[in-house]
Image (tube, rainbow, N blue to C red):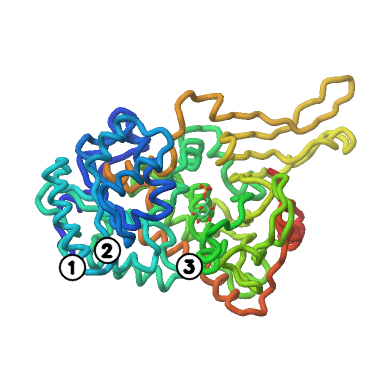
Amino acid sequence: MAPSTPSPEAAPEAVNPLAEGLESDRRAPPCALVVYGASGDLTHRKLAPALEALAADRRLSPNFAVVGVGRTPLSDEEFRARMLEAVSKPSAAWEALVGGFRYVAGGYTDGPTFERLREVLDEVDAAVGTDGNRVHYLATPPDVFAGVAGALGEHGLNEPGRQGCFVRLVVEKPYGRDLASALALDDAIHESFREEQVYRIDHYLGKETVQNVLALRFANAIFEPIWNRRYVDHVQITVAESLGVGHRGGFYETAGALRDIVQNHVLQVLALTVMEPPATVDAKGIRDEKVKALRAVDIPTHDEVTIDVVRGQYEAGWVEGEEVGGYRQEKGVGPDSRTETYVAMRVDVDNWRWAGVPFYLRTGKRLPKRVTEVSMEFRDVPHLPFGSKETRGLGPNALVLRIQPDEGIALRFGAKVPGQAFRVRSVAMDFAYGAAFLEETPDAYERLLLDAMVGDPTLFIRADEVEQAWKVVAPVQEVWTDDATPLARYRAGSWGPREADRLLERDGRRWRSP
Ligand code: BG6
C-alpha cells in the first residue's frame, strides 16, 4: 500500500530535543516497538539493555511492548526470557513490561509472518494499551531491509490505523553498499513509507560527546570566531579501535572500514565539525546544515584517491598486552583477503570557511587503543618573539574533542616554564565529562530509541545525507575495485601503516598521538 500524503506523521518536524528537550518531558508515548531480527545479536547486546535502562529511568510508557520478529522459532515465553537475560540486573520496571512482550516467528518477506504480526499487534493494543502506535525497527541483515519495508506496505502496516497515531520505520546501518544500492533502498522504502516516517540510525549521533560538538560550537562565543581557515591549520578525526573483527569476519569481508566506519560515523563527525551554525537547533535546521557541509566536501578524482587515500589491513601483533592474529587469520576471512581494516584519507572542504584547510581522517581496527577524537590544530603565531631554544617544548595550539572514552575537551597552549629563563612549553587545559557532571551518560541506543518513539528525527540520517556521504566515498570504492591498488599492511597494535604517516608528512604534518 503506497503511503498517502496527509497524515499526522507529515506534520512539521516539530519536536526539538536539543532546544526544548527538557529531561522531564522526554517520555515515550504508548507504543509497540516491532523489532525485526529479534533473536539476533544487536537486539541482545544493544536494544534490550537500552530499553531496560529507559524503563528503569521511567522514560517508557507503561503501555509499551516489544513485538519480536525473527526466523528462529521462539515462543513468547522464550522471547521474554531472552529479553530478561540480555540485561545483567533487570529492574522491576523492565520485568513488569517484559510480561507483555510477544514474538512472531517467520521469514522476513513471507505473507503469513505479516498476517500473524497484524493479529499480534491488535492483541497487544488490546492487552497493553499501545494505542495503535508502532515503531518498526529493522535490526536484520541489510539484504532484507527493502523486503520487510515492502511487506509492511503490502499488509497495510505502514500507515497509522487511525488519525492521531503514528507508524515509523527505524533502519539500522549499513544503509546500502554504495551510492546506487542506497538510492535503490530509498526507492524501495519510499514505496511504503514517507521520508518523515524513516529514521536511519548512525549510533555515533546518539553519543553525548558527538552532540556536544554542537554545544561547544554554538553555545559559546569564544570558539566559533576561530573555527575557520584563518586560524585552523588542519583537523584530524580519528576513530581507532583496539578490537579486531571478532566473530564478524564473514560480515566484515563484505564491508571493510570504508563502508563500516568512514561513510557513516567519520563523515557524520566531520559534518558536525564543519557545518555552519543552524538558524534553529531542530531537525530541519541541523540536518539541512549537515547536508550543506557534506556537499562542500571535495569529491576526489580517481587520481586523487591514489594519492590522498591509504588502505590498510592488520597483520599479527600485540594489542593491549595480548598477542593477536592478523586479519587474514580471522574466522570467516579468506587467506588472501584484500578487505581494508584501516583507512586514512585527506579531504578538503571547499567553502568560504574551510578552503585550504586539510581534514585528515583515519579509522582502523587493532590499533593500540580505542579512541575517537577530533583534533583541531591552529596556525602558528605570525611572529614568535622567543628564541628556538626557549620554545623547544612548544607545539601548536590545539583543541581536542575526546569523543570516547575518557570523554572531554582539552585545549593546548604555551605557558612560561617557572624559572629565571623565558622558556615556553605546551600545557593543556582539560575538561573531563566525568568530573564536571554527576549525571550518567545514556548509551547511544537509549537516546536514539527514545527519539524514535518520541518522533524526533534530529539525530537520524536523512535520505539526502546518506546519498551525499556515499558520493564522497564513491570514487574510493571505484578505485579499490581494481586489485592492483596497493593494500598497506600494518602490525596489530601499531597506529597503522607507514603510508598513512607519509600522507601527513608530505604536507609537513604529523598524526597526533592520542
Ligand atoms: C559499528 C561498526 O557501526 O561501530 C563496528 O559496525 C564498530 O565495526 C562500531 O566496532 C564502533 O562503535 P563504538 O560505539 O564502539 O565506537
Q: For mark 3, give the secondary structure.
A: helix
**Viewer-nearest of labels 1 and 2?**
2
Q: Position of residue 317 (x, y in %)?
A: 74, 55
User: Can you identify the residue that label 3 sits on?
Assistant: 471
Task: Please give left or right for residue 421 compared with residue 209 in the image.
Answer: right
Q: Earlier in the sequence, mark 3 or mark 2?
A: 2
- C-alpha separation, residue under disc 1 versus residue under disc 2: 16 Å
**Tag 2 secondary structure:** loop
Q: Which residue sits at x=64%, y=74%?
A: 303
Q: Is residue 234 left or right of residue 267?
A: right
Between 301 and 338, the residue placed more toward the observer is 338
- Position of residue 48 measured from the top left corner of the image (x, y, whole percent): 37, 44
Report the mark closest to the observer, 3 or 2: 2
- Amino acid type shown at disc 1: Glu
Label 3 – label 2 distance at C-alpha: 36 Å
Q: Are marks 3 and 2 in contact (CB under 8 Å)?
A: no
Quickly name the residue at label 2. 106
Marks 3, 1: nearer the viewer: 1
Label 1 neighbourhood size at 10 Å, few (<14), some (14-19), many (20+)?
A: some
Tally of marks = 3
Residue beneath label 1, please? 154
Classify residue 306 by image quadrant.
bottom right
Q: Does the residue at mark 1 contact the one at mark 2 (Cβ under 8 Å)?
A: no
